[in-house]
């Protein structure tokens, strides 16, 4: 899929990308590899805000997104942590087997679909396993701002938990680590931890989809939905939702696509995505994950209803009926007008 989408671009470097050198590669927990990326000439890297991620071009057919885990105040390096998954889609295995210290990797500029509300009276960070990476950057930022927060980090086992010691040494009483093999699952009791939070508290969670479902189902009893923020690593199955809030399982059908700026009308058949149709007609659009996770392709639409299938846009963003992800989302009706 990616090869096809990038087919026309294979000979040129994708926009907004640059080279970084792998200055260090090391295991920071069982199955978790940390890559430290620096500019090959020792210059500062592009700045970023807490919660941001970058694309790593592991080869010309494989682009993966990883959250930046270090403090946004550090200008000379990016840290990403990758869980090596035997049953994954190949990205983590490529990091494990193919990426070596000293290699140059093409990376994107940082993007942030998971921004921190920096003036919140209180913040709660809830990480499941490797989902701690964007939250770690948030904790650094909150500490720098002098803002109160609590960081709950749950992992299957201490040996699997990247940065657990670092969290405790950096953030001391603000951190609670809970490991299932030490009874952490029973002790988690998120309900108790979310009771009596100050008004305006913001909650951020990242981890496996089941874990985040549990956190959000619990958190919504105590906090307004707009104060609960999620970052997905994986696409959510059957995440299809029309922009009017209704579910639409009928999905694949052909529709007409009008590109306003290009003044072009295209037909999107049932077996093609909008991005594929645009690509075939020479209309470039930035894409990366092509499965609704990274936000690279977010595009404005001006007419029609969208059957949203991503996990990047929040409920309130969908309700505004302005943005969608053409890599995976489709028209809910017969026609969609987009701002391209
Ligand atoms: S390309 Fe990643 S959300 Fe569309």
Image (cartoon, grey):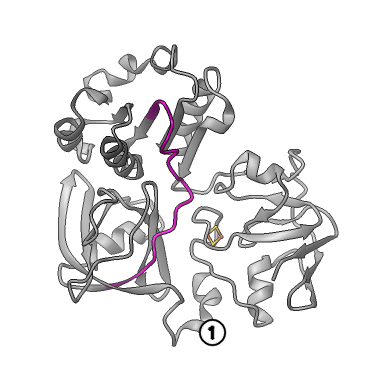
**Horizontal placement of 67 versus 299: left or right?**
left
| Residue found farthest to the bottom | 11
Q: Is residue 120 visible?
A: yes
Q: Residue at x 55, y 44 (%)?
A: 236
Task: Tell me the quadrant of the picture where the N terminus can be found.
Answer: bottom right
- Residue 140 position, x and y percent, is 27, 41
Label 1: few (<14), some or many (≥20) within 10 Å?
A: few
| Residue found farthest to the right | 334
**Horizontal placement of 167 versus 48: left or right?**
left
Q: Residue at x 55, y 23 (%)?
A: 220
- Residue 299 position, x and y percent, is 64, 62
Query: Can you tell me which quadrant of the image ligand 1 is in?
Result: bottom right
Q: Residue at x 35, y 41 (%)?
A: 131
Q: Nearer the viewer, residue 91 or 302?
A: 302
Q: How many marks?
A: 1
Q: Residue at x 67, y 74 (%)?
A: 278
**Quarter occupied by residue 5:** bottom right
Query: Is residue 231 shown in magenta?
Result: no
Residue ID for mark 1: 8
Q: Is residue 176 visible?
A: no
The kind of secondary structure element at disc 1 is helix
- Residue 29 position, x and y percent, is 18, 43
Q: Which residues are magenta?
A: 105-124
Above or below: residue 185 compared with residue 258: above
**Horizontal placement of 335 versus 18: left or right?**
right
């Amino acid at each position: 899929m990616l090869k096809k989408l990038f087919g026309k671009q294979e000979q040129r470097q994708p926009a907004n990308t640059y080279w970084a050198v792998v200055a260090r590669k090391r295991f920071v927990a069982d199955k978790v590899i940390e890559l430290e990326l620096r500019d090959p000439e020792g210059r500062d890297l592009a700045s970023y805000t807490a919660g941001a991620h970058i694309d790593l071009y592991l080869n010309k057919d494989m682009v993966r997104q990883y959250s930046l885990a270090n403090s946004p105040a550090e200008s000379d390096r990016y840290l990403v942590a990758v869980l090596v998954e035997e049953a994954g889609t190949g990205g983590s295995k490529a990091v494990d087997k193919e990426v070596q210290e000293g290699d140059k990797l093409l990376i994107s500029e940082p993007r942030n679909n998971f921004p921190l509300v920096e003036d919140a009276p209180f913040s709660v960070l809830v990480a499941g396993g490797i989902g701690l990476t964007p939250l770690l950057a948030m904790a650094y930022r909150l500490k720098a701002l002098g803002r109160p927060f609590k960081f709950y980090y749950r992992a299957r086992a201490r040996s699997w938990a990247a940065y657990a010691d670092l969290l405790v040494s950096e953030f001391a009483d603000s951190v609670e680590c809970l490991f299932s093999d030490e009874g952490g699952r029973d002790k988690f009791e998120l309900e108790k931890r979310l009771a009596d939070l100050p008004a305006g508290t913001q909650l951020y969670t990242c981890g496996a989809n089941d874990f985040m479902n549990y956190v959000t189902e619990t958190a919504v009893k105590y906090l307004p939905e707009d104060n609960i923020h999620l970052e997905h690593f994986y696409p959510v199955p059957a995440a299809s939702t029309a922009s009017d809030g209704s579910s639409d399982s009928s999905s694949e059908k052909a529709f007409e696509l009008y590109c306003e700026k290009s003044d072009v009308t295209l037909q999107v058949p049932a077996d093609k995505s909008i991005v594929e149709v645009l690509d075939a007609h020479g209309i470039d659009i930035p894409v990366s994950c092509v499965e609704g996770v990274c936000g690279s392709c977010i595009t404005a639409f001006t007419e029609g209803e969208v059957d949203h299938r991503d996990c990047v846009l929040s409920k309130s963003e969908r309700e505004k009926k302005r943005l969608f992800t053409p890599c995976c989302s489709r028209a809910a009706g017969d026609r969609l007008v987009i701002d391209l």
